[in-house]
Amino acid sequence: MTTETKPNSRERLLEAAATLTYRDGVGIGVEALCKAAGVSKRSLYQLFESKDELLAASLKEGAAAFVAGLLPPPDDGSSRERILHVFRQLG
């Protein structure tokens, strides 16, 4: 039996920020972010100083995940193979 953990408020806000920013741009409102994440404005401002800080954190996490998906494990062959792996991931 596996138990799935429910994403916490911070994770839900980061996911909502990524989704809404991609769809609607950075002009999205705080209310829309909170509604999509299922949290109150108070929760947003307890976790992040501003909407801009939330968006920056979301972009930073998204970029880190993107880069992690490109790179092979450190022990995955020669430098040439590692570079070819990155190009295959991009293709």
Image: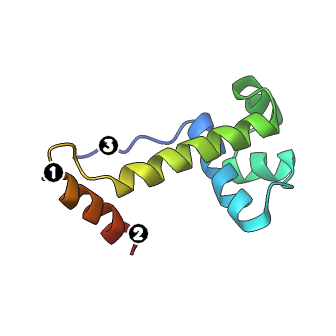
- Of callouts 2 and 3, the N-terminal one: 3
Residues marked 2 and 3 touching at CB (< 8 Å): no
Where does the image place residue 34, in percent across and percent down from the top left? 76, 45
Residue that numbered label 2 is attached to:
90
Name the residue located 32 percent from the left edge and 43 percent from the top edge. Answer: 3
Considering the numbered disc 2 on the image, is that residue within a helix, a strand or a loop?
A: helix
Q: Give the residue type at disc 3.
A: Thr
Where does the image place residue 21, in percent across and percent down from the top left? 73, 57
* Residue 76 circle label: 1
Q: Nearer the viewer, residue 75 or 19?
A: 75
Q: Nearer the viewer, residue 53 or 37?
A: 53
Say if 10 sits above or below 1 in the image. above
Q: Nearer the viewer, residue 75 or 34?
A: 75
- Of callouts 2 and 1, the N-terminal one: 1
The span from disc 2 to disc 3 (Cα, nearest Å) is 34 Å
Q: Give the residue type at disc 2.
A: Leu
